[in-house]
Image (cartoon, helix red, strand yellow):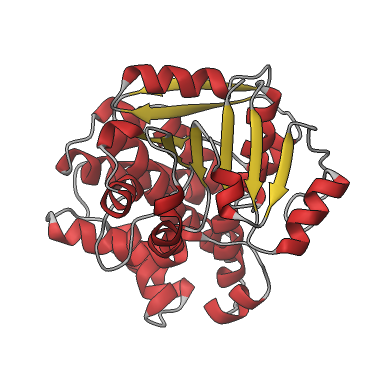
C-alpha cells in the first residue's frame, strides 16, 4: 500500500487526502494546530474547512510533521503558496529520500516570481524529476462530495506521473498526465487572478457576456505568458488551462471569484480578508504574475487591472472602464 503525507489541512489538502485514501493509499494529514489534528482523527471530519464530509479510515491526522512524513512515498504540499518557502525550510530535512513531491498550490512566489515547483527544488535540493504538480477544475467541496471531476498531473518523469495517477484515480476523480509543468502551473496561478476580475464584474452587477469575455481574454493573456516561458500552447486548451479557468471564474465555491465579488460590491481588500479564513491566492499572486509578465515583455491587461484594484486603491468600476477603453485591435 502506498503511504502518502499531505502537508496542509485546508479544504483542498483535506479533500485530496480523501481522494488518495479512496484510491487505496494510507494517508497522514498534517494540520499545524494540534486540536484540529485531534478532531480530524477522532471525528473523521475536518469541521473547520470541510464540514459535513466524512473522511475514510485510511486518513489520520497529526500536528507532528516528522510523524506525517515517516516513510511517505508521496509528499503532497497543500499550504498557501506564499508560505511554501518558510514551511519547506522547516520540513526539508524530514522528507524521505526519493519521495515524490506533489504540489497542490496555484501561485507565483512574490519577490522571486518562481513557480511552486521551482521553489520546491530550490529549498529541498530535489531534482526536477522528483517534483510534480496537479491542476485543473478542482473545486474542493464538489470533489469531497464525490461529484465527477478530472485533473492533470504534470511531471517530467513519466513513471512518477503514472504512479501519481494511480494513487489518486477513483470512480469520481479522473487524473490525466502531461509533461508540461510550466503550462500547468501558470494556468493554475493566472486563473486565480482572472477569477478575481470575473468576481468583481459579478459584484458590479454585470452578466454572462462580461464573464465570458473576461474568461476568453484571460485565457489569451495566460497563454501569451506561458508561451514566453516555454509552455505548450495546447496545455491552455485543456483541463489545466480552460477547464480550471471556467470553473474558477464561474463557481460561487471559488475563493477568488467570491473575493472579487465582494470587492465589486464595495468591500475593501482588508474587509474581505477579515471576513473569511480561506486563502484567495490571486490577491497576492497577481503582483508576482504581473512582475513575471513584465520581465518577459508580455501584455497582461486584466492582471494589471486586478493589481490596481487589490493593491493600488483603484475602484472596481474604474477598472472595468479602463479595460473597455483600451485601444481596439485584431483578436
Q: Residue at (29%, 29%) from the top-left corner? A: 180
**Residue nearest the viewer, comparing 160 with 326:** 160
Q: Position of residue 79 (x, y in %)?
A: 52, 55
Image quadrant for the N terminus? top right
Q: Residue at (25%, 30%) from the top-left corner? A: 233
Q: Is residue 232 visible?
A: yes
Q: Is residue 207 visible?
A: no
Which of the 4 quarters of the picture holds residue 226?
Answer: top left
Q: Position of residue 14 (x, y in %)?
A: 67, 44
Image quadrant for the C terminus? top left
The relative height of residue 214 versus residue 205 in the rendered view (above or below) is above
Q: Tell me: 218 left or right of 268.
A: left
Q: Position of residue 150 (x, y in %)?
A: 55, 25
Q: Position of residue 120 (x, y in %)?
A: 34, 49
Which of the 4 quarters of the picture holds residue 274?
Answer: bottom right
The relative height of residue 323 versus residue 252 in the rendered view (above or below) is below
Q: Tell me: 331 left or right of 134.
A: left
Q: Tell me: 49 left or right of 42.
A: left
**Residue nearest the viewer, comparing 199 with 169:** 169
Amino acid at each position: 500500500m502506498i503511504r502518502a503525507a499531505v502537508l496542509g489541512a485546508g479544504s483542498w489538502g483535506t479533500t485530496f487526502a480523501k481522494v488518495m485514501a479512496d484510491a487505496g493509499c494510507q494517508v497522514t494529514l498534517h494540520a499545524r494546530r494540534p486540536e484540529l489534528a485531534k478532531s480530524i482523527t477522532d471525528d473523521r471530519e475536518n469541521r473547520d474547512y470541510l464540514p459535513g464530509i466524512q473522511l475514510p479510515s485510511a486518513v489520520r491526522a497529526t500536528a507532528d510533521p516528522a510523524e506525517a512524513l515517516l516513510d511517505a512515498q508521496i509528499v503532497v504540499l497543500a499550504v498557501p503558496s506564499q508560505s511554501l518557502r518558510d514551511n519547506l525550510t522547516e520540513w526539508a530535512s524530514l522528507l524521505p529520500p526519493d519521495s515524490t513531491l506533489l504540489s497542490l498550490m496555484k501561485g507565483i512566489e512574490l519577490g522571486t516570481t518562481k513557480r511552486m515547483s521551482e521553489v520546491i527544488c530550490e529549498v529541498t535540493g530535489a531534482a526536477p524529476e522528483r517534483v510534480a504538480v496537479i491542476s485543473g477544475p478542482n473545486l474542493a467541496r464538489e470533489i469531497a462530495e464525490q461529484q465527477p471531476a478530472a485533473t492533470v498531473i504534470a511531471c517530467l518523469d513519466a513513471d512518477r506521473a503514472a504512479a501519481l495517477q494511480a494513487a489518486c484515480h477513483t470512480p469520481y476523480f479522473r487524473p490525466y498526465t502531461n509533461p508540461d509543468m510550466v503550462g500547468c502551473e501558470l494556468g493554475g496561478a493566472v486563473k486565480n487572478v482572472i477569477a478575481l476580475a470575473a468576481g468583481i464584474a459579478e459584484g458590479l452587477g454585470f452578466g454572462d457576456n462580461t464573464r465570458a469575455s473576461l474568461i476568453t481574454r484571460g485565457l489569451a493573456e495566460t497563454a501569451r505568458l506561458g508561451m514566453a516561458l516555454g509552455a505548450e500552447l495546447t496545455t491552455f486548451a485543456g483541463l489545466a488551462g480552460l477547464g480550471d479557468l471556467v470553473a474558477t471564474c464561474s463557481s460561487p465555491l471559488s475563493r477568488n471569484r467570491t473575493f472579487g465579488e465582494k470587492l465589486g460590491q464595495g468591500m475593501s481588500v482588508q474587509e474581505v480578508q477579515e471576513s473569511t479564513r480561506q486563502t484567495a491566492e490571486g490577491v497576492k499572486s497577481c503582483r508576482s504574475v504581473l512582475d513575471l509578465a513584465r520581465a518577459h515583455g508580455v501584455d497582461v491587461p486584466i492582471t494589471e487591472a486586478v493589481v490596481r484594484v487589490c493593491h493600488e486603491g483603484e475602484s472596481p468600476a474604474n477598472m472595468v472602464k479602463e479595460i473597455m477603453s483600451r485601444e481596439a485591435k485584431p483578436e
